[in-house]
Amino acid sequence: MTGVTAVADAPAPVSHTRANVVFITVVLGMLMAALDQTIVSTALPTIVADLGGSGHMAWVVTSYLLAEAVATALAGKFGDLFGRKLVFQVSGLIFIVGSMVAGLSNGMLLLIIARAIQGIGAGGLMVTSMALIADVIPLRDRGKYQGALGAVFGVTTVVGPTLGGLFTDHASWRWCFYVNVPIAIIMIVVAARAIPSVRTVLRPIIDYAGIALVALGVSCLILGLEWGGQQYAWGSTTIIGLFVAAAILLTAFVFVELRAAEPMLPMHLFRSNVFTVCSILSFIVGFAMLGAMTYLPSYLQYVDGVSATVSGVRTLPMVVGLFVTSIISGQVVGRTGRYKYFPIAGTAVMALGLYLMSTMGRGTGIWLESLYMLILGMGIGLAMQVLTIVVQNTVPYADLGTATSGVTFFRTLGSTFGTAIFGTLYNNQIGTKLAEALAQSPGVSPTTAATPQLLRKLPEAQAAPIIEAYATSIDYVFRWVVPVAVVGFLIAWLLKEIPLRDSMRAEASDVGGGFSVPDTADSVARLEFALASLMRKLRTDELPDPLILAASGSSLTRDQAWAIGQVQMLRRARGEATLDAVARAHWMPPEVLEPVYDKAVRLGMIEFDGPRMHLTEAGVAESDRIKAAWRSWVCGRIDDWDCANPADRALFDKALDNIATKLLDESDRPELLTARV
């Protein structure tokens, strides 16, 4: 992941219309992948009543999230190896297969397997969606499109329960999966026509061993937590064996990562206090958010007696709280550069929200329940928005992409463990409580007790003990998760506050960025975007050209510096430079530029070989001086840039070359960066 990625066959320039078609196609992929994380939460009670296997309910969500996490780690590398367009389409096809099998499932085991297949497709769709935006969307517009994509990811993640309820009530829970099929087919067909093919020059090194070990280790750990106290006693050979296997596999994962050429999760990142603390907090935020969103609809359907649709709508206060505090915290961090107290406040409020929700019961009114959900959502939003930005702010630029992927990976793992542990706590309670309730309600079958629609039709005397059993069990779950949030609160105090880089302060204000969308691990692409964001925000009176020219020690005037810069840029991007090519790049007649280049020839900076231009030895020396001055200027504008680090210098040069290439490929007139590169 830490290698510099070079583009071999950059896509041909695309029109504004085609770029929008690509964006809509990518949005469809992101929408399906994000939606299916939570769409089943409101359908779970009905699925369990239909298929049975209530003890495996959490795995319907967990298998999806775990497979998605693994696929996310692989998809970026496969995109470099086989082309992002192909990986995007294959991921869509896998998602279709998983959706069809899930919709046709006649048992819980088959549904869990189908959800894992869906998760593999979803991981590929998410990662390649962000990479395709970087490939196709013009650089100056990329921030706007990435922000919109992040917002889509956030919105669909949190409104999934409502849509799942609508399908469950008005069609069938199976339509939560069938609905993906026509959307995915349209997406694949449009992608075949609209998305350009891009493949990298460098053959990526894929950490197969690391990915396999972490996937197996986490699976063993989750299976042990899921089965413990249910299928097997906690002290049984099976459960102890699973925990021992998890420990061995995860230890082996660490050793493999220490020796891997391009590790999935470089261990040196954990030397950073900020990365370690933010990874733990991301895990806890994912734990609380997905765990709560999975079991809240069950509470509302069983205890409050509402329909699946209404249970989804009733979770919206949590969504509102999450959105409001995400926006506020991002804006404040972007303006002040201060972030430490947001995770502290967020985990404290999250703990309070979980505790309040553990006090809910049959007598709790709708407005009070909504307030408790609002508080939980506010806590999650306060903590979630800043964690990725904080990590990007502190790691070396060569590790930008890997560190970002790492924090997102821990959030997904947190969601997986949250759902699993919520399920374990719930299952350890509901079996006993429900058996006691059924003993007090003669004539009520287990099927009726497990089906919210049938439970609502029972007489009050028969329904009351069963409803109380569900209320007590789910309250128990929320009560035991409070300590997890408290641990997060204590850990948040250990987070060091380091002044935000200018580029990171710009990203902190982006609402979409707060949802930790699985992003590309390509550090060059991330730095490229950061540099472009920084340049876009400069005012006209801040443009540094004269200062940089003076600092470089060059005797050239601005027009001559610009002229040799264009030759250098075109030769790197296209292999050759001509006067016509420079003119086309700036939408002007070649005759306008002829005096500038005639002067450069007289000064001995440029030579012509037929129509082709190339720099003389003196021209190359002047170009290198100016580029070094640019690098120094960037060092002054972006905190923590290590100018003495060869890896950071190489990253900077590659990012500038990529920016130059992409600006040349854009059909509109470049305004800022063309003249500078």
Image (spheres, rainbow, N blue to C red):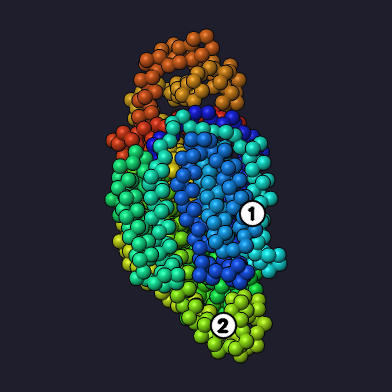
Task: Residue 154: give x, y in percent of width and height.
Answer: 54, 57
Task: Residue 628: give x, y in percent of width and height.
Answer: 35, 29
> On the rendered structure, is 397 left or right of 177?
left
Q: Nearer the viewer, mark 2 or mark 1?
A: 1
Q: Which mark is residue 652?
A: none
What type is the residue that disc 2 sits on?
A: Ile
> On the rendered structure, is 371 left or right of 633?
right
Mark 2: give few (<14), some (14-19) or many (20+) Cα within 10 Å. many
Mark 1: give few (<14), some (14-19) or many (20+) Cα within 10 Å. many
Q: How many marks?
A: 2
Task: Residue 476: give x, y in percent of width and height.
Answer: 45, 78
Q: Which residue is mark 2?
A: 467
The answer to whether one can see residue 303 in this image is: yes
Which residue is pictured at 50% across the width and 58% down the height? Answer: 63
What type is the residue that disc 1 sits on?
A: Met
Q: Vertically, is 221 above or below 313?
A: above
Which residue is pictured at 33% across the width and 60% down the height? Answer: 244
Which residue is pictured at 64% across the width and 48% down the height? Answer: 184
Which residue is pictured at 62% across the width and 62% down the height? Answer: 106
How many angstroms separate mark 2 from mark 1 (CA)? 34 Å
Q: Looking at the image, tell me whether mark 2 or mark 1 is earlier in sequence order.
A: 1
Task: Residue 665: give x, y in percent of width and height.
Answer: 56, 30
In contact (CB < 8 Å): disc 2 and disc 1: no
Identify the image quadrant of the C terminus.
top left
Q: Secondary structure at mark 2?
A: helix
Q: Secondary structure at mark 1?
A: helix
Which is nearer the eye, 538 or 611?
Answer: 611
The answer to whether one can see residue 154 in this image is: no
Which is nearer the eye, 365 or 445?
Answer: 445
Asked which quadrant contains residue 219, the reply is bottom left
Q: Which residue is mark 1?
A: 100
